Amino acid sequence: MKKFSLIFALFITGFTFSQNRIEDFQVTLPETKVPNSLYKTLKLVDARIDSTNMGIVQKGAFNAKAKVVPTVSLRKQLQSVLDAQNGTDAQNGEMLLYLKQFSFAEVTGAVSEKGYCYVQGFLFGKNADGTYSSLDKIDQVILHSSLDVTKATMKKGSEMISNFIAKNATKTPATADKYTYAEIKNYDQIVKGKYPLYANSTLTDGLYTGFESFRNQIPASETFTSVKFGPDNSKIVKIYTNQTGKDKEIQKDQYYALIDKGIPYIYSDLDNGFLKMNRGEGNELYYQARAKATAKTGNVVMASAFFGIIGGLIASDTSAKFDMKLDYLNGAPIPIREVKK
């Protein structure tokens, strides 16, 4: 899942349209009942970066871009999903969904359209003492390909969230960890604090083969002895080992990240090097990196940045630089804004 956050963050950073086009989202209600459900109420903590819309789709013969904006609030629609699933034997428990992503995106290929829906969040059950404990988490993307994908993708997105709720409707929360409602509203900070990358004041120098090892601060067995910086010292362009008494260059694209003198750097194919990361608000890790983009990005980055990562679906070879934030759950880059020249 670590490569799936990018597109949806791209779509929720802001939109610039020649016309104010809107596409409604109406969740497709499930037809199958869940026997012996423990929950009758579903509450929502909407932690999406931009809760005013649910991404972007294409409308009409010219594929005009339209924001997905539900006329009925997402909170009410998710409750209606639980209502539709429950039978007469449902108990009176309460679910709480901490929602980080629920977004749609589309791209047009040579002979078909591809629609994506991405859902990311944490689900909790309410305990008898009024606290909440974990039920499950979701970090999932679905793809639908056809001549006209909008309705089908929205239906599949509805099914994805419905199935997530249904499979947890009979599950008792794991009470090892208990959180108040106020703590759930700040749940990102709680989760990040469990990982050494965010919790440790000093980071471990070394090379890291993947996001998990980077987040858990477990460097690879291979070590580097020196690095070569680019002109502005914000990018490491070469790394060397000197185990035999002579410098030997290490193939840098085999590694996800490195830490040098306590400073973290993340590898970027488009930048052909390791990019310096800086701590920011909420202890997040920020950096600047290039991403594939359409010719006219403006304040809006189109789908091609994400699709270049997952399948070479880019129609344009142009790229642009963005302020990025690292997704602490899956290691994906989350573009915040385009860096103007």
Image: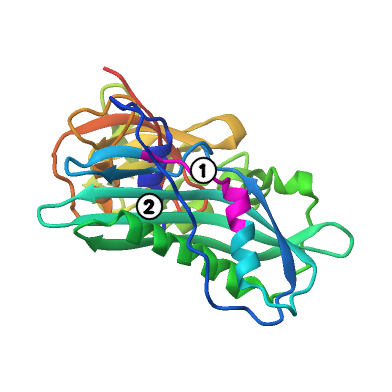
Question: Image point 33% across, 61% down: which residue?
Answer: 152
Residue that carries the numbered disc 2 in the rendered image: 223
**Can the viewer see residue 102?**
yes
**Can the viewer see residue 173?**
no
Image check: 269 left or right of 6?
left
Q: Could you tell which of marks 2 and 1 lies nearer the N-terminus?
A: 1
Q: Residue furthest bottom?
A: 35
Q: What amino acid is found at the position of numbered circle 1 in the picture?
A: Thr
Sort mark 2 into few (<14), some (14-19) or many (20+) by Cα contacts within 10 Å: some
SS class, disc 2: loop
Quadrant of the rendering where the C terminus is positioned: top left
Q: What amino acid is found at the position of numbered circle 2 in the picture?
A: Thr
Q: Position of residue 239 (x, y in %)?
A: 29, 43
Sort mark 1 into few (<14), some (14-19) or many (20+) by Cα contacts within 10 Å: few
Image check: 280 left or right of 294?
right
* Quadrant assignment, res 145: bottom left
Q: Position of residue 291 (x, y in %)?
A: 27, 38
Q: Which residues are magenta?
A: 67-78
Question: Image point 48% across, 53% down: which residue?
Answer: 26
How many numbered callouts? 2
Image check: 274 left or right of 175?
left
Residue that carries the numbered disc 1 in the rendered image: 71
Q: Is residue 100 magenta?
A: no
Q: Is residue 73 magenta?
A: yes
